[in-house]
Amino acid sequence: MTELLIREGTPDSSGTAPGSSVALPTPPTRRERLRRLPRFLGHRPGLVVASLVVLLVLVAAFAPGVLAPGDPNVGVVADKLRAPSGAHWFGTDYLGRDVYTRVVHGASLSLQATVIAVAVALVVGGLLGLLAGFVGRWVDEALMRVVDVLLSIPAILLSLALITALGYGTIKVAIAVGVASVANFARVMRAETMRIRRSTYVEAARSVGTRWYVTLWRHVLPNAAGPVLVLAVLEFGLAILAVSSLSFLGYGAPPPAPEWGSLIAEGRNYLATSWWLCAMPGLTIAATVLSVNRISRALDGEWSRAR
Amino acid sequence: MIRYLARRVATAVGVLWAAYTVTFVVLYLLPGDPITTMAGGGLDGEPLTPEAIEALKVRYGLDQPLVVQYGHRLGEALSGDLGTSIQNGQDVRTAILEALPPTLQIAVGGLLVAVVLGGGLALAATSTSLRWLRQLLMALPSLAVSLPVFWVGLMLVQIFAFGLHWLPSVGASGFSALVLPSTTLGLPMGALIAQVLAKSLTTVLEEPYVQTARAKGVGRAAIHLRHALQNAAIPALTVLGYVAGNLLAGTVVVETVFTRPGLGRLTVQAVGVQDIPLVQGIVLFAALVFVGVNLVVDLIYPVLDPRIAKGVPATS
């Protein structure tokens, strides 16, 4: 469902038939690919902007001091609730703290949670899918029923149930979000594994006596990984949204620490007078998610289609 | 038809049972015991004595082995008893039913917004012959799903309540208080409907029978609304089942943003005090709604496309 959401609406995704490679062309050399890159990006200014945004967010997450040298938790009370200006790009909050600095420093916590969430979903879902697709029979049947059930509980409620049991905190929120999206990964991984399991080279590997775990590791996994990794990038965008929602509801890091969702929750009390407190962190989230989605679309075969 | 129906109902019951099991595993097996939370002085500030803790455990059946607890609670759940809230001793089913009406209001409103916006957008995008306009319209849904729902709600409040003074910002009184929450809730769902419907409309409009109709001289609008829409609606209907389940989940955020009473608020409160029976009840209720709506959708399919009930593989 979510895949559909992001992929539709791309003008370049329709009308090109996949799998039209009956006569395999020789794979392009590195130099050829490098030469193609400027033209490919030149036709896609949105992709360039998206990459820049993601790059900035990554810098903010790992080295926030580069983008915002100030302390996110220290403010000048005399400067409280100032509108965005040259001195304070995103304005200041009720304690005079610079919102831009807080958003930049918040990237690290929010992104940390997102990465953990996607990693949990990828590993657990991937393993379940691999097992279901490779073993087949009743194992497949049983695992897929579990997946069906996970899909029948709305993701945010499943996350909330997990938070009830686990408690509050950035990491716990991340795990809750990750478990809630295990089902998507399991389904894609299973479909890929089943497709590859029937292919000729797996049959060949088996017929020469390769052990099953070697087949799985050397032949099935590398070839099944592509679509799953594309899904991971896509889920990354969704996980940012889910993590920030839960942080907005107050289940994330405790107050003084900046988190994108809780920044918006704080700003909510000043909505009538100070619009920037909510608007700026929200726009940051939106820009990040849009950029991640754009990149996931690009990874999903846009390069190979654009010949 | 009877066999089709029976199979659907059996699947639905199976999913519900499994949902119960999943929530039980999550809530009762993981660390974090409600009695310990209460013993820490959660309710009246007085830490409980060990004897009182034991008494509470016996009262809620938490002293028994998990398998026994599971069987016991499942039996109760089957007879419609979801237990009592740990927070205030209220019956979980009553608590849910009491919180339901205001939530239903915005859920129905949200569904309306989603269908009107999504359907309208899909029809507009597929009927325009201007390429740039079509691309612009179809870019809107992927934009809409990239925005955090709570932020969209707050921005709507900012603009329409505080800026223009058209609508109230919070509260649950009257029709005008429904507009902003319903819009917030419906937007992402509308985006989903728009994408699915536009995709299937595009496919259907290339079918030979549409060409025939066009050759006969049927007008554009008539082809769109009478010939294409009926067949294109089937995939959109599938999405509708998904949408209905998620509307309920969406109220968690929306009711918090707009400070409305309802099931979403109840959920947030229950999670806040680790009220395990209440959380389980709500999750189960959401699964019930999801399964129920999908069952209804499954029953509507054969009406729209008679091939489905007869077991003929339908063209997607």
Image (cartoon, rainbow, N blue to C red):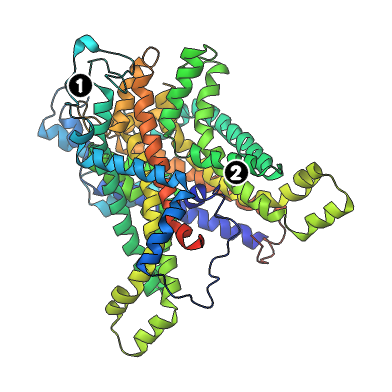
Provide residue A134's location: percent of width, then percent of height.
37, 73
Q: Amino acid at mark 1?
A: Asp
Provide residue A27's location: percent of width, then percent of height.
42, 72
For the C terminus of chain B, which image quadrant?
bottom right
Classify 10 Å Cα crowding around label 1: few (below 14), some (14-19), many (20 and above). Answer: few
Classify 10 Å Cα crowding around label 2: few (below 14), some (14-19), many (20 and above). Answer: some
Q: Nearer the viewer, residue A169 or A26?
A: A26
Mark drawn on residue A51: none
* Image point (51%, 17%), residue name: B160
Q: Nearer the viewer, residue A220 or A39?
A: A39
Q: Which residue is mark 2?
A: B135
In the image: residue A59, left or right of residue A234: left
Q: Is residue A141 visible?
A: no
Element class at badge 2: helix
In the image: residue A100, left or right of residue B281: left
Provide residue A143's location: percent of width, then percent of height.
38, 63
Q: Chain of mark 2?
A: B
Vertical position of residue A188 compared to residue B223: above or below: below
Q: Is residue A4 visible?
A: yes
Q: Nearer the viewer, residue A155 or B272?
A: A155
Q: Nearer the viewer, residue B303 or B225?
A: B225
State the image quarter where residue A221 is shown: bottom left
In the image: residue A164, left or right of residue A32: left
Q: Amino acid at mark 2?
A: Gln
Provide residue A147's location: percent of width, then percent of height.
41, 57
Element class at badge 1: loop
Q: Looking at the image, how many numbered discs can be counted on the residues?
A: 2
* Image point (18%, 29%), residue name: A69
Furthest-top residue in view?
Answer: A78
Q: Which residue is mark 1?
A: B44
